[in-house]
Image (cartoon, rainbow, N blue to C red):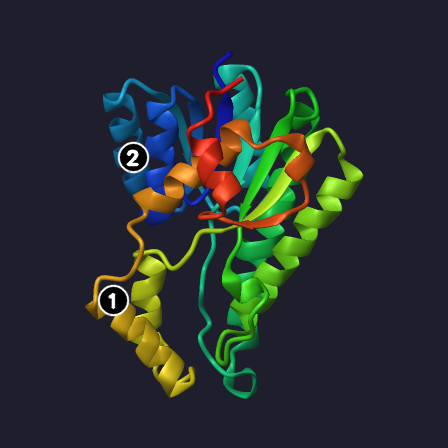
Amino acid sequence: MTSSILLTGASRGLGRAIALELARAGAHLTLNARSAQALAQVKAEVESLGGQAVVLAGDVSQPDVVERLVAAAVLAFGRVDAVINNAAVLEPLARIADSDPVAWQRNLAINVLGPYLMIQAALPYLRKAQPGRVINVSSGAAVRAMVGWSAYCSSKAALNMLTQVLAREEPGIVALAVRPGVVDTAMQAVLRRAGREAMESQVYQRFIDYHRQGQLLPAEVPARALAALALKAPLRWSGRFISWDDPEVQALIETPAA
């Protein structure tokens, strides 16, 4: 049976790469991002690969947007089998003493409240899937304190705990938090542009060197892992914080879908 997957942050970078990987696998996609124009481009790319997609632009921290997104998936494809919560922001990059409380609140609204709203709205449909899956795109920053990253570190730590609670509350759903690695995306560009003043100099330089030396992961590499998890992650993994390059995840990529 063709899977119906709802993906946020789908207009560029890792989200776009996940969408294209899922299209190649034959999934039906409901795609969200804030840019309608960029979403339309991704939809065209999905369809060029023979996939089907519906799109809805909007901010995932707004309950009405989330409700319309889930409704669009059900109207188009009859169900929701998986949710990939990929939409996120890095900023504000500032030490706590210098940070803007409004920007800090905005980070948590997108990075934590958005996934919570998406999970809650999709739960009635995920419970009917066998099994339903929630893939929360997390970060190594969830478990490693970074100077200047208080909002991002806190939001990703909260996302990991949300994943664990969901796994306990919904034993029929696979809930995973996934570390995608250091990926060559717009978020890295933000870090290089805005991180110098807030971050420790040696850490900032390390990210600059990743870029200069071509060490950032192409988005397509972790996208394969995230797509495989959304399609095939087993129930026994639920509640885990797992890395894209974990040997079990890499083996799953090659495992045929049930």
Q: Is residue 247 visible?
A: yes
Which residue is drawn at the image coordinates 72% and 43% (left, top)? 166
Spot occupied by residue 137 in the image (x, y as percentages of width and height):
51, 49
User: Is 29 drawn above or below residue 110 in the view shown?
Assistant: above
Which residue is drawn at the image coordinates 37% and 34% (left, top)? 19
Q: Is residue 106 visible?
A: no
User: Image quadrant for the C terminus?
Assistant: top right
* Callout 2 amino acid: Val
Spot occupied by residue 69 in the image (x, y as percentages of width and height):
52, 32
Spot occupied by residue 124 in the image (x, y as percentages of width and height):
70, 26
User: How many callouts does the rendering have?
Assistant: 2
Residue 38 vs residue 168, the one in the foreground: 168
Tell me the crowding category of disc 2: few under 14, some 14 to 19, or many 20 or more residues within 10 angstroms, Cα based. Answer: many
Spot occupied by residue 98 in the image (x, y as percentages of width and height):
51, 86
User: Is 44 drawn above or below residue 75 in the view shown?
Assistant: below
Residue 89 vs residue 2, the one in the foreground: 2
* Callout 1 amino acid: His
Which residue is drawn at the image coordinates 51% and 33% (left, top)? 230
Q: Are marks 2 and 1 in contact (CB under 8 Å)?
A: no
Q: Quadrant of residue 173?
A: top right
Which residue occupies the extreme top position in the image? 1
Label placed on residue 241: none
Tell me the crowding category of disc 1: few under 14, some 14 to 19, or many 20 or more residues within 10 angstroms, Cα based. Answer: some
Q: Determine which residue is flagged by label 1.
A: 211
Is residue 243 rendered to the left or right of residue 204? right
**What SS does tag 2 mark?**
helix
Is residue 199 rendered to the left or right of residue 134? left
Q: Determine which residue is flagged by label 2.
A: 42
